Image (tube, rainbow, N blue to C red):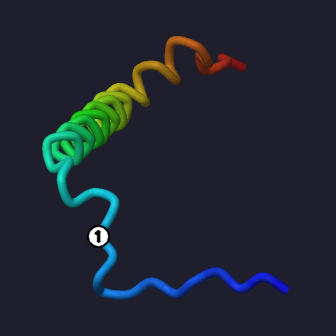
Amino acid sequence: MFTPPLATCDQPSGNRGNSRELLKTVVAASLVTGLEMFDFTVFGFFAVMIGDQFFPRKIR
């Protein structure tokens, strides 16, 4: 049976020397989240008007 070696403090982390890539990833994720929240907010403001246009009230 094979048992993989345990991680120790002597082993370097995978992202230590690549902080620029990490920064780019964080900025990109933040930008996408901001755009998604903007879209959700705009739709929330216009939901009633959109509903009235697509589903008009029937007059009896």
Q: Residue 46 in the image: x percent, y percent? A: 35, 25
The residue positioned farthest toward the right in the image shown: 1
In the displayed structure, 1 sits above or below 19; it is below
Residue 19 location (% of width, % of height) = 15, 50
The quarter of the rendered structure image containing the C terminus is top right
Q: Which kind of residue does numbered mark 1 sit on?
A: Pro
Quadrant housing the N terminus: bottom right
In x, y percent, where is residue 12?
29, 70
x 57%, y 83%: residue? 5
Q: In this rendering, would 35 be left or right of 27?
A: right
Quick one: SS at disc 1? loop
Quarter occupied by residue 37: top left
Residue 30 in which image quadrant: top left
Q: Looking at the image, which residue is at 27% across and 41% down?
A: 25
- Number of disc labels: 1
Q: Residues within 10 Å of mark 1 (few under 14, many from 20)?
A: few
Q: Is the residue 33 above or below the residue 55 in the image?
A: below
Q: Nearer the viewer, residue 51 or 8?
A: 8
Query: For this view, does 23 lie left or right of residue 50?
Result: left
Residue placed most toward the observer, 30 or 38: 30
With 4 as the anchor, is 19 left or right in this view?
left
User: Please, which residue is most extreme toward the top here?
Assistant: 53
In terms of depth relative to the viewer, which is nearer, 46 or 27? 27
Picture residue at 31% right of the left edge, 67% below the top:
13
Which residue is the site of mark 1?
A: 12
**Residue 9 placed where, x, y %?**
30, 86
